[in-house]
Amino acid sequence: MDRRALLGAGAALAATSAFAADAKFSGRAFKVPDGACDCHHHIYDPRWSYIPGAALTPPPAPVADYRKVQHRLGTSRDVVVQPSSYGTDNRCLLDVLKQLGDGCRGVCVVNSRVSDAALKALHAAGVRGLRIQFGLGNPVSADEVRPLARRIHELGWHIQINMPPEQLTQMEPVLRALPVPVMIDHLGRATASNQPQYAAVRRLLDGGRCWVKLSGATLVSQAPDGRDVTSAALGYVRAAPERCVWGSDWPHPESTRRVDPVPMPDDMAVLNRLAQWATTEKLRHRILVENPESFYGFDPARRPKAL
């Protein structure tokens, strides 16, 4: 195909539902254990409007489509993360938590204007963390991170971080001093151990209260399948296997950008990549099952069967 044909195909993909067709799913590279958790995905439901000027405006990706993806992957628990497109309007997130039930936890976005009553209501609905995201609208400022962390501490929540590498390195002292655990999104946007952002994440990991999501490889990779992030992923897993979790990043919103989209990945290939970062069944069980239970509060005695 020539370049114009390729661009046309990409535009057609962006205009359709975010659920990939059957042909996009390859076979599983390993047996997915009971209770496996996808610790990072989004839902986009047209019942709720995107905020004005949203940087990402993906096509609809409702719960029904995510359930199909979950069935193909074999995961039976999940963590839905508030996307930048909704800002601090968490109504879609709350609806997802209601639909998916006890096997789902949420990560919301709120700023310092949120009331204590609203935080308690979010907790009762299944929210267990607050996402701080820079680079896609910045609904929460850097100055709000410490005060918000103090407020969510009593709820047992964590702070989840998604930001460009240079901001992550700048924020390292702040993150290290927070009174709550810190979860780093998308490998800290690192591909190799010689990068400043990787070094910052490793120092935070070594401090004992930081966790890392093995997710979003195609966001930083120069290869369509994310294979060139292996150095960073292996480094994190070797350093702190008890504080790594995996996430699909479905429906891959940055692949639907109108300008400079990243390649749309095969969701099964995203899962299969974990076999190269966690090379034993025991280690994969820890990352997919035990670590999410510890971090998000899933009941180890009630592990759903693999789908």
Image (tube, grey):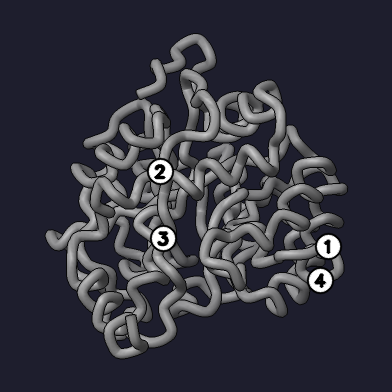
Task: Give the mark nearer the N terminus: 3 vs 2.
Answer: 2
x and y percent of residue 11 in the render? Answer: 25, 79
Residue kind at label 1, given as amino acid type: Ser
Which residue occupies the foreground of this view, 144 or 263? 263
| Secondary-structure class at tag 3 | loop
Of residues 111 and 194, which is closer to you in this image? 194
Q: Which residue is mark 1?
A: 193
Marking on residue 114:
3
Q: Which residue is mark 2?
A: 26
- Relative to 268, does residue 130 appear above or below in the rendering? below
- Disc 1 is placed on an element classified as loop
Mark closest to the chain's N terminus, 1 or 2? 2
| Crowd rating for badge 1 (residues with CA inside 10 Å; few <14, some 14–19, many 20+) | some
Mark 4 and mark 1: span between their CA atoms? 6 Å
Residue shown at the point (61%, 24%) measured from the top left:
285
Label 2: which secondary element? loop
Quarter where residue 12 is shown: bottom left
Q: Which mark identifies residue 103?
A: none
Is there CB contact under 8 Å for labels 4 and 3? no
